[in-house]
Amino acid sequence: MDTTAVSPLTPLGVIPDLKNATSVPFNETACENWKEIHHLVFHVANICFAAGLVIPTTLNLHMIFLRGLLSIGCALFIIWATLYRCALDIMIWNSVFLVVNLLHFIYLVYKRRPIKIEKELSSLYKRMFEPLHVPPELFQRLTGQFCNIQTLKAGQAYAAEDKTSVDDRLSILLKGKMKVSYRGHFLHNIYPCAFIDSPEFRSTQMNRGEKFQVTIIADDNCKFLCWSRERLTYFLETEPFLYEIFKYLIGKDITNKLYSLNDPTLNDKASKKIDRQPSLCSQLSVMQMRNSMASTSDSEDGLQMFLRGTSSSSSLRNNQHEFCNAYGVSRLQHDAFC
């Protein structure tokens, strides 16, 4: 009796020859027979990928170089797949990758474009904002949307005592010179790259509806940068870094006005020299200024402590009384400061 098992799939009457059956050769899956090396274009594309991936992140432009090398590698893969392999799928996938990397590359290059600051504002940026590491694009946003440049002829008033509201604007003098007086008595001059109404800006943070207690008149033909107070305040609330910068600059400006009260003949050259001298205001970092000038409990107390520390002579103390009277005891706390 033939005991050979018949497979259900074997046609009737046909007996498989098990002795002559052969198995699949193992060498077809073990890669014993390597194919020929690909074209040089293929290897150059992979070299571009490798070079892009090993670029150190400490390099300033590493993302731009990475996207650029990835784009070159994808372009070479497209050439290789089209001309030497005729592989449609490889060409399509690398075309998609090429488009994605090119879009990233263009965007990164656009972000690194040089920011052009207006000629009238370049000296202001270099003197006040660049030393505090304010990026040019942030300065451009600050000066480009809700401020304008205004002019005053010699003899015209920027603010009149007890008449002009302090709630409307904040300004920095760009060109010319202004004189500040209180009840007909000269207090100090205002020179370029200085705030015109920094004490008033400090006062409106606590009290609204106040009037200028000093008269500010253009001594020369003046040009100044003027912000809308309300829109500037809203913008600074969305930019915490710039908010701290403004606190520092305004506190420093008030301090410089105290120095100029001690010497009413102080000219622009001497004012710049004081601005460069190592003082408490210039030595403290922005964070330290925030802690000393704008403490969470009472921001005005911090300002008074700071201003009190910048003066020790009796002549400056006497002039501080005039400063307090001119700019209002309600916001400079006459008992604590004057």
Image (cartoon, rainbow, N blue to C red):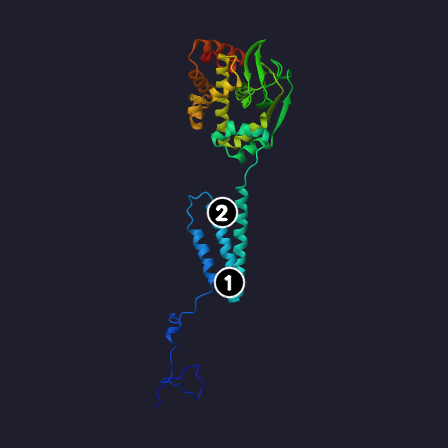
Residue 220 image point, x, y percent: 61, 18
Percent x, y of residue 332: 49, 15
Quarter-of-image position of residue 215: top right
**Can residue 213 be seen from the camera position used here?**
no
User: Who's the residue at 35% across and 89% down the image?
Assistant: 2
Q: Give the distance between the C-alpha atoms of the residues marked 2 and 1, in whole angstroms.
A: 24 Å
Q: Nearer the viewer, residue 38 or 30?
A: 38
Point 51% across, 63% down: residue: 81
Q: Is residue 312 above or below residue 174?
A: above
Relative to 319, does residue 140 appear above or below in the rendering? Answer: below
Percent from the top left, x then y, of residue 13? 43, 89
Task: Locate the N terminus by quadrant.
Answer: bottom left
Closest to the observer: 189 or 183?
189
User: Callout 1: 10 Å neighbours few (<14), some, many (20+)?
Assistant: many
Amino acid type, mark 2: Ile
The x, y position of residue 279, in whole percent, is 43, 21
Q: Give the SS element for disc 1.
A: helix
Residue 30, which numbered label?
Answer: none
Please determine whether, in this image, residue 38 is positioned above or below residue 60: below
- Graded by Cα atoms within 10 Å as few (under 14), some (14 to 19) or many (20 or more), the crowding at tag 2 reads some
Pick the front one: 30 or 166: 30
Q: Which residue is mark 1?
A: 80
When asked about the image quadrant of residue 194, the answer is top right
Q: Secondary structure at mark 2?
A: helix
**Number of numbered tags placed on the structure image:** 2
Q: Which residue is mark 2?
A: 64
Q: Amino acid at mark 1?
A: Trp
Q: Are circles 2 and 1 on residues that touch, CB within 8 Å?
A: no
